[in-house]
Image (cartoon, grey):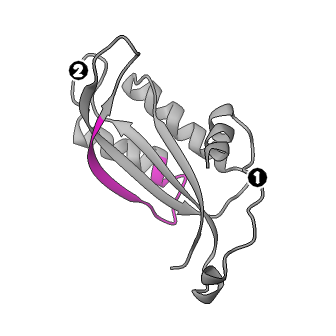
Amino acid sequence: MAGLLELVLSGCQTVPPSPALPASCAALAAKASVQITLMFGLTTPEHQAIREQDWQDFLQRDVSSRFPMGLTVLSGEGKWRPDEASPTESEPSRLVWIVTADTPDLPVRIGAIRRAYRTRFHQQSVGVSLTRACSAF
């Protein structure tokens, strides 16, 4: 899993081929997939809350448009340290969970979402985690 994250963060264009699916995946008629979790802080560097209307606009324009088959948004409380000398900070956050096929353009779409959020809301980072899976709907 760490290797997948390194690939996305390093800007590689594809995720390595997935190993054979476990028997339980076949038994459930599930197909190979990638589960993506994007982590968004909802406070600007000036400690201003990102308005819900602005978040919804970003979600529609920049996320849903790139993953029109669906996604899940979860509210949370993020904790992070800007650097090792700083205290841990806390802020409202959103996790966007996407289950999708592993396609060659996946890193490009994820990278575009992360860049758009950092630019629009002046964020230092947008977290991302990828996990290989099998899924059925």
Q: Is residue 91 above or below residue 14?
A: above
Residue beneath label 1, please? 16
Q: Is residue 77 left or right of residue 29?
A: left
Q: Is residue 56 magenta?
A: no
Residue type, mark 2 in image: His
Q: Secondary structure at mark 2?
A: loop
Question: In the image, which disc is placed on residue 121?
Answer: none
Point out the tag, 1 or 2, that comes first from the N-terminus: 1
Q: Which residues are magenta?
A: 63-78
Please state which of residues 26 and 47 is positioned toward the viewer in this rendering: 26
Name the residue located 21 percent from the left edge and 29 percent from the top edge: 49
Residue beneath label 2, please? 47
Tell me which corner region of the image, top left, top right, bottom left or bottom right, holds residue 58.
top left
Q: Is residue 13 above or below residue 116?
A: below
Residue 101, image x and y in percent?
A: 64, 64
Q: Is residue 33 above or below residue 86?
A: below
